[in-house]
Image (spheres, rainbow, N blue to C red):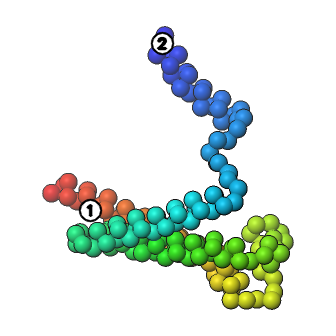
Amino acid sequence: MKLFQAILCAILLPVVIFLLPEQAWALQSHGPPEGIYVHQLAHIFYAAALGYLCWDIGRNAFPGRGWRYLQLFCVLMIFWNLLTFSGHWLGFHIAETDIVHSSGYFATQLLGPLSSIKLIYFCASLDHLLSVPALFFLFLSLRSLYHSSGREEEN
C-alpha cells in the first residue's frame, strides 16, 4: 500500500505543479548594471572554457573524427561568444529609437542614418549563423564518438 501511495504521489505531484503554477522561480531579473555584467562574464568564461577544451583535445591528439568535430564546435562557439559579447556591448551605444519592432520581435528594423556601430550591431544579431552550425558539429561529434565506442566494445 505504501508503494502505491509513493508511486501515486510521484506521478500526481509533478502534474499538479505543472497544471497549477503560481510563480516561476527560474528567472532572477536584475536591473542594470548587475545583470549585464554577469551575462558578459559568462560569455568570457564560456569562451575560455571552450578554448581550453579545444587546446586540450589538440594537445592530447585524440584519434578519430569525433574529436575533430568537437574541436570545430569549440572554435565556432568561441567565435559565437565573441560576436555575442560585442553585440551586447554595442547595444549600449545604440539608442532604443534606432530599432523598431514593427510586427513583434522577429520583424526588427534598424532605422537610419546607418553608422558603423549600427551595422556591426546588426551583424552581431545574426549570431545564429555561428551557433547552429556549431551545434550541428557537436551532434556529429557525439554521434561519431558513440559509434566508435560501440565498435571498440565489439572488438
- Mark 2 secondary-structure assignment: helix
What amino acid does circle 1 point to? Ser
- List x then y, in percent, for residue 41: 53, 63
What amino acid does circle 2 point to? Lys
Numbered disc in front, either 2 or 1: 2
Q: Residue at x 83, y 75 (%)?
A: 97
Residue behind mark 1: 148
Q: Is residue 107 left or right of residue 32?
A: right
- List x then y, in percent, for residue 109: 78, 78
- List x then y, in percent, for residue 19: 69, 34
Q: Residue 152, relative to residue 116: is it above or below? A: above
Q: Residue at x 83, y 69 (%)?
A: 103
Residue contact at pointers 2 and 1, CB within 8 angstroms: no
- Mark 1 secondary-structure assignment: helix
Is 106 in front, or is 60? Answer: 60
Q: Residue at x 59, y 62 (%)?
A: 37
- List x then y, in percent, for residue 105: 76, 66
Residue behind mark 2: 2
Residue 28 visible somewhere in the drawing: yes
Q: CA distance from mark 2 to mark 1?
A: 45 Å
Residue 69 visible somewhere in the drawing: no
Q: Which corner quadrant holds the C terminus?
A: bottom left
Q: Residue 8, relative to residue 137: is it above or below? A: above
